[in-house]
Amino acid sequence: MIFTLHGIAVSSGIAIGHAHLLSHNSLEVEHYTLPKAFIVDEIARFDAALQATRREFAGLRSNRPSYAAAEFDAFLELHQMILDDPLLSIGPREMVEREHCNAEWAIKVQTDALAAQFDEFEDAYLRERQADVKQVAERLLKQLSGQPGHQPTHLRHDVETILVAHDLSPADMIQYKPQQFAAFITDAGSATSHTAIVARSLNTPCVVGLHHARELIREDDLLILDGEQGVLIVNPDKAILAEYRLLQSEWELERKKLKRLRTARANTLDGAVIELHANIEKPEDIIEARENGATGVGLFRSEFLFLNRDELPNEEEQFEAYRAAASGMNGQPVTIRTFDLGADKQIKGAERVASNPALGLRAIRLCLAEPQLFRTQLRALLRATHYGNVKILIPMLSCVSELNQTLQFIAATRQELDIEGIPYDRGVKIGGMIEIPAAALSLNVFARQLDFLSIGTNDLIQYTLAIDRTDEDVAHLYDPLHPAVLHLLSHVIGTANKLGVPISVCGEMAGELAYTRLFLGMGLRQFSMFSAQVPTIKQRVLTTSLREIGQLTQKIMRTDDPMKIRELLDKLND
Ligand code: PEP
Ligand code: MG
């Protein structure tokens, strides 16, 4: 049956492929009471599901991927142990017998009891194993529902595959290799979550916030995903398929054409020089940055080096990663942000549970709370400055004491390297992210002590409007054109320019065509965005005259009616 779903467009492009469903952890089951006569059958149904799950594990073991044999064996062993725990293998049986409830409900109750035991552990790694308990229970429930195998071990390589998930963390997403999937779709999520940001950097179409896609789509369904419009078509007919194949090839042609701008300078019609930099997550991403004509890296989110692993990267490993990015850009600037861990990007085994993670121990707050970790990174970063044009960027500054402490850490690390005779760039530039309204409103104090500034619009909007950027329920309120946001942006850009401190924007707004002229009109001359977007923004810069957009930008800034702002913006972009 053909149907269409609408979500939040995150990464553009058109993908056509077959669905691959990723398991999710929701254990929502019904609860009902059975007549006494049905109890024996219900127990038999549970036993059969248990046996089938054991067989499923045996099958997984024999089909394990050779590149990850050790990890896979450890993972299977743990899941088999969980399945054999009396609370899961015997408990539900006894509960059905005793309470005459359905087997699904008994599994859910016993799973919650087992997960609660994990909650008691002091060790964060063990506490985290609750997720494994839920995954095992989900396998069992799938067997009961008669729909096992939602997660085939082998992807089909003969067709394009679109990954369908309830939700994906940034750590999940970063594991996918470019081109492994033709597209990603999730029920949860929002446009500026880190998951979305990684999807963009993989240059793969992605739509999030689809709510029930994971339930409605079946494995192998044919899907069309329009990442520009946020539309998903499930089981399209031949005519629709043909239409989208045409659109897909037109889109690819357009991208190829834009890539021809790679070596052109991004100057406005009246000759202003605009720098278009790339945001990267891993050193290898510089290949794509260079291919798209970025003239530097404006944001290297170094925290991605810390995800999906049991042991943290040591100084040497970090140094190699930063050096690779620095030398790969051949003297062009590479701005490396100290790790912005916490909130939605947590170190495995050291996850912190905070009631408001976005307002908690994140980014520079976490760096200062974990001096050993921070010191290791600073040593690696400073050492890498010797091999290219590396700048260091501090995330999430909110007050001057954080800045002072950070600068002291950097000074102490420099001293250490001096004593050890290790070379580094003595003129290394230190910059700060302006992404908390408090910092935006007290810009002078940061501008005085820093060599450059970079506006993180993703967080600046989140904190100004009190909208959790990862929460799809409030995603509709996340508004970059809110007059308060525009005033903060204009204030920060104008003040930095007046003080002569270089300023860029590295949040997702920098890569959105709709805002390019608005930013230029506010006085911005440096943008940093996901690599694939550089040619599109360059084309817009090349067709813009600063003289012509000045008045209209001023008018937008004087307007506080959101509808009127949008109207004027459309005019600016005409
Ligand atoms: C931002 O907040 O805009 C930003 C660039 O940082 P991140 O998205 O990694 O929080
Ligand atoms: Mg940020």
Image: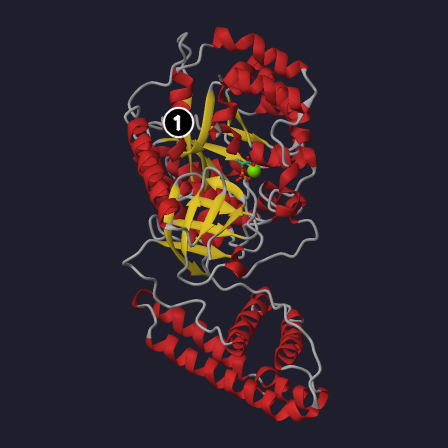
Horizontal and vertical percent for residue 431? 52, 29
* Number of numbered tags placed on the structure image: 1
Rendering quarter of residue 250: top left
**Residue identifier under label 1:** 536
Horizontal and vertical percent for residue 61? 37, 76
- 290 versus 232 height, above or below: above
The answer to whether residue 473 is seen in the rendering is yes
Compared across the picture, whether 227 is left or right of 400 comes to left
Horizontal and vertical percent for residue 387? 33, 34
Q: Residue visible at 31% across and 38% down?
A: 249
Compared across the picture, whether 378 is left or right of 495 comes to left
Q: For disc 1, does the CB lie below 8 Å from ligand 1?
A: no
Name the foreground residue: 22 vs 251: 251
The answer to whether residue 296 is seen in the rendering is no
Rendering quarter of residue 46: bottom right
Q: Residue visible at 57% across and 35% down?
A: 458
- Label 1 Cα crowd, 10 Å radius (few <14 / some 14-19 / many 20+): some
Q: Residue visible at 64% across and 33% down?
A: 436
Coloring scheme of the render?
A: secondary structure
Name the foreground residue: 66 vs 124: 66
Horizontal and vertical percent for residue 357? 65, 49
Rendering quarter of residue 6: top right
- 366 versus 424 height, above or below: below
In what quadrant does ligand 1 lie?
Answer: top right
| Element at label 1 | helix
Under mark 1, the amino acid is Thr
